[in-house]
Image (tube, grey):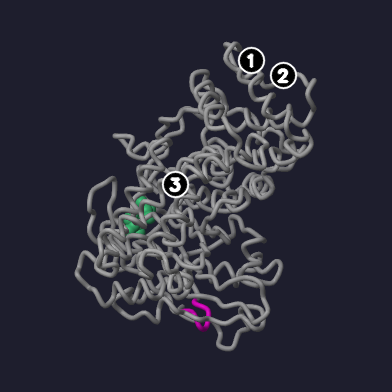
Amino acid sequence: MNDISSGAAVWEPGWRWNNSFAALGPEFHSAMRMQPLPGPYLVGHSASAAGLLGLPTGALLSPHWHDIFAGNQVPNGAQPLSSVYSGHQFGVWAGQLGDGRAALLGELQPPAGHTGCAQEIQLKGSGLTPYSRMGDGRAVLRSSIREFLCSEAMHALGIPTTRALCVIGSDHPVYREQPETAAVVTRLAPSFIRFGHFEHFCHHDLLPQLRQLADYVIDRFYPQCRLDTRLKGNAYANFLQAVTERTARMVAQWQAVGFCHGVMNTDNMSILGLTIDYGPFQFLDAFDPGHICNHSDNQGRYAFDRQPNVAYWNLYCLGQALLPLIEEQELAIAALESFKTVFPQALDACMAAKLGFHEVRDGQRELTEDLLRLLAEQHVDYSIFWRRLSHWAAQGALAEHEPVLDLFLDRTGIDSWLLQYSELLAHIPRGLAADLMLKTNPKYVLRNHLGELAIQAAQNKDFSVLGQLLQVLEHPFEEHSDFETFADFPPDWAAGIAISCSS
Ligand code: AMP
Ligand code: MG
């Protein structure tokens, strides 16, 4: 089963495998023997992600490709492997983890002149690996659909993320709290390296490998760190600072859009500042700063409003792992300090855009804090509020306040907030502000109940809801008159959805 007919022209001409992570050596990974997935079928695919690999249009509709993305056939040139990493889970050192159910097929390099960058292709749920520990190496259909849809939704929202090419399903049974069926998500990213990879080599005092890994990531993704004269020209400290800044900006975007990751363990933190490992994530319905979206998170460690602090804590772990390379503790601390300026600045910039301001304005932070307090007190739907505010701004100074006010039981607070906001807005041409708001405040987000609708249909072999949702989430700022219901308030049953780490 382990190869396809030799010489088959798999990718479009000019694309070639360049498996640079594999070339790091056996300390970093183990070769994978793929476990066949019986009877693979296509559940959903993203044409835009397919474009990143130069896949011919419609390729994903052919059984040949279903076999490849189920892990049943390994394309010529791919070198399937699972990587080793460790990490802190829920604030506690968890020791060795690794890709327990993911196979990196390899890295595909576009032809010269192509605008895209090289992409690693990873199959998640492809079977047992040396790092599976007590797990079965599989992923269930429901979690694969959630990961697929959210990856593509986040990308369309402009938030850095790993991408998802397709979900391949199978009737192969997988046992969680109850019997379910297996699926494989094909994920794409320039690299799947996590903070936990660095923690692994530091923890085991494998200094040459730690340096090799850091040099690899710097050379490929952070080459400017070698030229940076800040932090005494220390390339590793500059690397830590660059990761800190990317992570800070990513989390600022999460907070602005109301995204709760749910499992911000250090093994779920990308070294490229990408959102990675979609499990019990949630887009907020009613605004609740302390919202805990992960049913297994009893202490609320990963509550919505704790995400920035947790990101900083995780970066601190990365800093400790890089310390043997940075050598001077003060430099590591200085690199991490950048979080404290970059995060608030990035959040201010995101909130400015949501309010229709092209730059951060005096008094904006107080205005935002007042608003968020009102939204929390009155349990106002976060996404619907911003969208209605955008439409109100678009309609001009004399526009009806009603659609916005209707979201509040007690209107006194929001009445005076709108007055204050109007004064700031008066300095900007309405059209410009409204344009920015309508491009910043999505009409469609992947609420839990929407994912659930797609999952329930798919479990009955109806993949149309997933296709419709993807279509809408790929253009979340546009109107989709056929799919207005996807922009509605959550139904009552949404409150009963409990998403845990079990996937
Ligand atoms: P996650 O919570 O999905 O980020 O997973 C944490 C760790 O558990 C990672 O090392 C995963 O590879 C591993 N893991 C999760 N689910 C499974 C599974 N079903 N089989 C094997 N390993 C798993
Ligand atoms: Mg993970």
Rendering quarter of residue 138: bottom left
Residue 132 seen in the figure:
no
Contact between labelled residues 2 and 1, with CB atoms less than 8 Å apart: yes
In the figure, is residue 163 to the left or right of 114? Answer: left
Secondary structure type for disc 2: loop
Of the two numbered discs 1 and 2 on the same chain, state the one appearing first in sequence. 2
* Residue closer to the observer: 324 or 494: 324
The residue singled out by tag 3 in the image is 341
In the figure, is residue 272 to the left or right of 148? Answer: left
In the drawing, what numbered circle is on residue 471? Answer: none
Mark 3, other Cα within 10 Å: few <14 / some 14–19 / many ≥20: few
Of the two numbered discs 2 and 3 on the same chain, state the one appearing first in sequence. 3
The residue singled out by tag 1 in the image is 415
Secondary structure type for disc 1: helix
Rendering quarter of residue 325: bottom left
**CB at mark 3 closer than 8 A to ligand 2?**
no
Measured Cα–Cα span from mark 3 to mark 1 = 33 Å
* Residue closer to the observer: 128 or 380: 380
Residue 9 in picture, x, y percent from top left: 63, 83
Secondary structure type for disc 3: helix
Numbered disc in front, either 1 or 2: 1
Measured Cα–Cα span from mark 2 to mark 3 = 36 Å
Q: Is residue 76 above or below residue 247?
A: below
Q: Amino acid at mark 1?
A: Asp
The residue singled out by tag 2 in the image is 401
Q: Amino acid at mark 3?
A: Thr
* Residue closer to the observer: 60 or 273: 273
